[in-house]
Amino acid sequence: MTVRQLVCLFASLVVLSHCATADPAHTGDWGGGAPERVQDERGNQRIPDSRQPTSEELAAAFEPEGPPPAPATDAAAPAVASGVSDPLAEAKQAFEEAAQRVEKAIAARDPDALAQAASLNALAEPLGPAQVTRAWTLRAKAARTSGDDAGAVAFAQRWLLSCGPTAPDACRRQALRWMEESARHGAHAAKTKRLVADVRKADACLVSAETSARRGGAVPACLSAAERMYRTQRDGLMQARAALVRAQAAQRDERHAERGVRELSRAEQLCTEARCAQVRRAALARLVDAELERGDRLAAARAAIREGQVYAATLPPAERLYAWTDTMDRACAALDAARGTGSCRALERHETGAFVFRDFSRQFAGEGLGPEVVRAVNAHFGVTFEECLASEAERLRMPAQERYTVRWTVLNDGHVGQMRMDRQERDDGPLARCLRQKLTLWRYPRYEGEWQHVEQSFVVTARTHMR
């Protein structure tokens, strides 16, 4: 026999009845069908005790009220803290200072420039591909300044293999030119120049193949030789780009649709380095479309969630929470339509153990926030409240029933400002602290005019389930 406490929600304007288990790890059921509803004795449609509310049902509970005048700042209504510090700020500063010292040494033609550049890669590695490329670039230039042409060639090769995700072709041209210029003398000059010529030929072929693929053309015969070159060089980015070209060609032929899906998966998996993020996202976005076309909405949603993870990894740590993409929008809408609202969020938690969100404050809504906009944002972020409500259910004892009213202010920048509860003593309670912490994550569109106010009432009831 197990006692399990449940929490029931009721909205102040639009009624939302919901009995949720104290386990916050479930949001909808991505393996099931449309959300079940029951009818109470008054004929109202309600959510049964057997499941949690969907994101849309939570959103319906958060109806924005009319535009009352903005209240004066009240010390009894704690503000929602905002802003996330960058955990890599000190590391970035240390790398930047070291890089600038090396640049000054190179400009002064200091023979110790190469020794000063030796620490750059260790500083750059945790920061991302842009800093890694910059480190190899400076080491190649410092080697030339110090008279070490062989070192300059070796570092320029590492520079070449670090290019991406931004403007990889321009980066590669610069690295190849530096290799060629650094190999003017020495026993290995001819060998280096042949390698540079071969890589340039492969790169030109790949760029031509990508252009042809965008126009619906055939794969050029030279691509096979280019792929061999990239395998020899162990260049995962260029291998993945070539695989994506072949996948696009296979997709255009209905007879090879299945092969196209396999090639897209292969292109995404060929290079998992941070510099390969753009080609991985491109492959995953195409994979989502291919799976939707085949009718496999679950596979499409999985690919979209993975695309969001790849995108998140490219962002600064403080911004990775807001990695929701248009591809996720498209795939999740399809999955929710087939299996019930909230199914994609449940799948996301199942696959990743967490959620990502869209930063709506990057959008501008104009004058005020309309009800539809507020509902959309609340539906998107509503999953963040589940943990708070489930914990509050655990704190209640039978036959306790409590009603809570929460009101928060949406500032013009889209962030949540003050949040207050209906009674002052509750403002410092565990539920208020939890809700306030979750609201730091919410982002509404920016807007002009009077502040928007959102009010929500909860009735939390302790119940027992016998089993």
Image: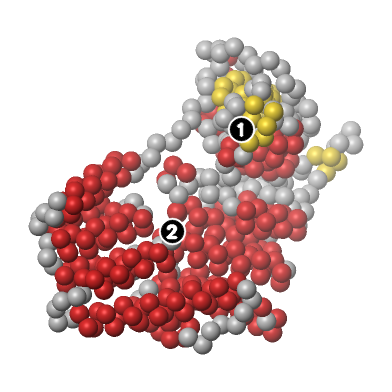
Residue drawn at x 68%, y 15% as measured from the top left: 69
> Can residue 205 be seen at all in this image of the molecule?
yes
326, 203: nearer the viewer:
203
Disc on res. 126: none
Task: Name above or below for residue 284 compared with residue 390.
Answer: below
> Can residue 18 be seen at all in this image of the molecule?
no
65, 244: nearer the viewer:
244
Looking at the image, do the residues carrying marks 1 and 2 touch, with CB atoms under 8 Å apart?
A: no
- Residue 372's spot in the image, x, y percent? 75, 36
What type is the residue that disc 1 sits on? Answer: Arg
- Residue 246's spot in the image, x, y percent? 55, 79
Callout 2: few (<14), some (14-19), or many (20+) C-alpha neighbours within 10 Å? some
Q: Quadrant of residue 110?
A: bottom left
From the viewer's perspective, is 200 left or right of 286?
left
From the viewer's perspective, is 450 left or right of 413?
right
314, 6: nearer the viewer:
314
Callout 1: few (<14), some (14-19), or many (20+) C-alpha neighbours within 10 Å? many
Residue designated by label 2: 166
Residue drawn at x 78%, y 27% as measured from the top left: 13
Quadrant of the rendering where the N terminus is positioned = top right
Judged from this view, the residue extending furthest toward the left is: 111
Q: Secondary structure at mark 1?
A: strand
What type is the residue that disc 2 sits on? Answer: Thr
Residue designated by label 1: 446
Residue drawn at x 66%, y 38% as measured from the top left: 377
- Residue 118's spot in the image, x, y percent? 17, 57
